[in-house]
Amino acid sequence: MEYFLLITGLICMLVGILGSFLPVLPGPPISWVGLLLLYLTKGIPFSYWILGITLFVAVAVAILDYVIPAKGTKKFGGSQYGVWGTNIGLIIGLIAPIPLGFIIGPFVGALVGELIYDSKDHHRAVKAATGSFIGFLASTFIKFVVCMVYLGLFLAKVWDYRHIWF
């Protein structure tokens, strides 16, 4: 059972890191579940403080993941179409076999979304797409950093108690 929890926790960590880039997966909460599974093993002493603080951070980042791109779009004069375009462009950019599609896709998606919203004002559409893209990058960066910190905590605990498993 210990190995199952350890391996499942590591899988959750890796899926959480992947989820920091994919809008359909909540990266930090999935990584937090990986930490929880690690602490549920008999060899690791349970820490309410670490789990509580990391849960708070995971929930806060999950909420900010929706707020930051919208604020970036609004700050640059965009609409909800730009936010939706960013997410759709990211998914298409990940699937499309083009280099750096995960970066190009959100910008092009936001631009297309803004042009659908108002096809006459190209300057505003580019400005709003830029804002949406910057918000997306900021949100993704924050999620990635949090997931990497959680992975670091996970690996540090496994290393500290390696005598139990190895």
Image: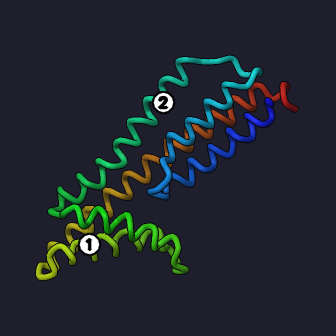
Residue at the spot x=40%, y=40% of the render? 61
Whether residue 164 sits left or right of residue 85 in the image: it is right
Which color mode does the image show?
A: rainbow
Whether residue 58 sits left or right of residue 84 in the image: it is right
On the image, the x and y values in percent for residue 77 come to 15, 62
Q: Residue furthest front?
A: 1
Q: Nearer the viewer, residue 37 or 121?
A: 37
On the image, the x and y values in percent for residue 49 come to 52, 18
Amino acid carrying mark 1 in the image: Gly
**How many discs mark residues in the rendered view?**
2
Task: Tell me the residue that label 1 is attached to.
Answer: 113
Residue at the spot x=69%, y=36% of the render? 155
Quadrant in the picture for residue 111: bottom left
Q: Nearer the viewer, residue 27 or 133?
A: 27
Disc 1 crowd, CA 10 A, few/some/many (<14, 14-19, 20+): many
On the image, the x and y values in percent for residue 164 come to 84, 25
Disc 2 crowd, CA 10 A, few/some/many (<14, 14-19, 20+): some
Task: Tell me the residue that label 2 is attached to.
Answer: 55
On the image, the x and y values in percent for residue 92 come to 45, 73
Amino acid carrying mark 2 in the image: Leu
Q: Quick check: 124 above or below 165?
A: below
Residue at the spot x=88%, y=32% of the render? 166
